[in-house]
Image (spheres, rainbow, N blue to C red):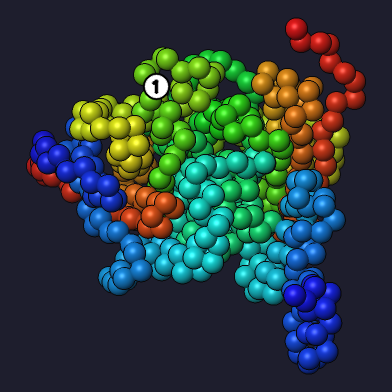
Amino acid sequence: MATIQQKVDAICKSSPEAARKLEEAIAALEKTTLSGDASTDPIARLGKGFQTFKTNVYEKDSALFDKLKTGQWPKYMVIACSDSRVDPATIFGFNAGEAFMVRNVANMVPAWEPSGGYPSVASALEYAVKHLKVEHIVVIGHRLCGGIKALVTTEEGQGSHDFVENWLEIGKAARAATKAVVGSEDVDEQCKFCEKESVNVSLTNLLSYPWVKEKVIGKKLSIHGGFYDFVEGSFQVWDLDVNVGHSRKF
Amino acid sequence: MDQLATPPVTTKAGPPQGLGGILDEGYELTDHVVVDENHIVEGNNDVITKLITGFKTFKEGVFKQKPELYDKLRVGQEPKMMMITCSDSRVCPTMLHGLEAGEAFIVRNVANLVPPCEGSGQHHGTSAAIEYAVTVLNVENIIVMGHSSCGGIKALMSRDDFSGDFIGSWVKIGMPAKKKTLSLLADKPFEEQCSFCEQEAVNLSLVNLLTFPFIQERLHSGSLQIYGMHYDFVEGKLTTWRIAQTQKMGAHN
């Protein structure tokens, strides 16, 4: 059984092309695994990652990155969960400059509330809709969301944390619908239901912002729900349509 | 208003469920699509096309190429770091650092601000995310990353009145950074003041992290580290720094 060293020697002897490929593979491995640092020191990890990005992306796509120095014109606003497994850029291939992104626990959009608090989502929504004039807002939920599980398994006011459960109460209508429809199923089935239902709650909450509703009715902005299931490897998407009902004459 | 029929519960991803009566009259859910390998992208709705095409690329690529990673992630997430970065479309941390699924719990908001710890009972999104990352996921590192040409910081620096809209209410979290900036760079050009404030606001956010007891405890015990970063996409450079305690805090017993 040849040792690694023997294999390396054999490859290097076989052809210059093979030797070159081996060198490239080693360099790539060194970047991510060597100097122990990158595996334990987050700054080393992020710094090395940045060097790779700078060489392979930033400097290569100079037309795009030069333009982005002067501003951003994203067409999309994406609201996704902070979960480390569900990064929209990875999953949908958004390039730099394409999507203005909010990420929070359980991809929640609170209803419009004009006074007080720290409007983490409302401020981003306002910036995206009024200033950047995005054309589409997508709220993306996902399977195995820890936040939704906490929402499903905790009654209002019973949470053990200072902030988490309070935040998740934004989705309480989704919990109510879940209990009503699949309350007799096991927790995982309830979570599956609630994960999508809470996206619907966020979509309806989006429409509670007058300047969002106005643009949706005026067809300048459209709203979409999405659901990423990394257990199955699937993605589903749906639209929220607005029908203007009765017209009245004055 | 129309009651949406209760859909059957299945183990596969089903259609979006009923809204339990919350949807106002005049609104409905439409165009539900489930994407798998066989799905043919149709129609000229560009956002849906983009999402579906992008997903198929991801599924055929990274998702299939890394089965061990995704098998592990089905069981749970164990990110070692939390990143708080701006919602700006140009500063996606996974792209900037080549992060893989499972590596970083990421919060994105306007101007990557962390408000101070406050128990007012209202919805505190960033605080909730920090609490979840630290006390549930037990992340070991928190990184706050600011960036050049930040619109949120520019709004902070250019406005005197922060009332009247959500952006004002949010960016005024950064007031201490603005004050410090103006005291040090009063006569400098506005752009220079903004650049300084971008980094100073990161420092302010780091200081605000320290107002959370669960963060103080873990910093004290050494199980959590805090870092600041600034990405300058005009120059193409990344600056990093760390916050460390200079003296031991009193014992918590």
Decide: is B229 above or below A2.
above
Quarter holding residue A55: bottom right
Residue A156: give x, y in percent of width and height. 37, 18
* Residue A235 visible somewhere in the drawing: yes
The structure residue drawn at horizontal position 70% and vertical position 64%, both measured from the top left corner, is: A53
Residue placed farthest to the bottom in the image?
Answer: A15
Q: Quadrant of the C terminus of chain B?
A: top right
Residue placed farthest to the top in the image?
Answer: B253
Quarter holding residue A195: top left
Q: How many numbered discs, if any?
A: 1
The structure residue drawn at horizontal position 70% and vertical position 32%, both measured from the top left corner, is: B205
Horizontal side, residue A1 vs residue B8: left or right: right
Chain assignment, label 1:
A
- Foreground pick, A177 / A144: A144
Residue designated by label 1:
A154
Q: Amino acid at mark 1?
A: Thr
- Foreground pick, B143 / B230: B143
The structure residue drawn at horizontal position 70% and vertical position 44%, both measured from the top left corner, is: B145
Horizontal side, residue B152 vs residue A2: left or right: left
Residue A211: give x, y in percent of width and height. 37, 42
The structure residue drawn at horizontal position 37% and vertical position 50%, both measured from the top left corner, is: A227
Horizontal side, residue A80 vs residue A202: left or right: right
Q: Quadrant of the N terminus of chain B?
A: top left
Residue placed farthest to the front in the image?
Answer: A1
Residue A208: give x, y in percent of width and height. 33, 35
- Foreground pick, B153 / B18: B18
Decide: is A87 above or below B54.
above
Quarter holding residue B69: bottom right
Residue B208: give x, y in percent of width and height. 70, 26
- Foreground pick, A116 / B126: B126
- Kind of element beneath mark 1: loop
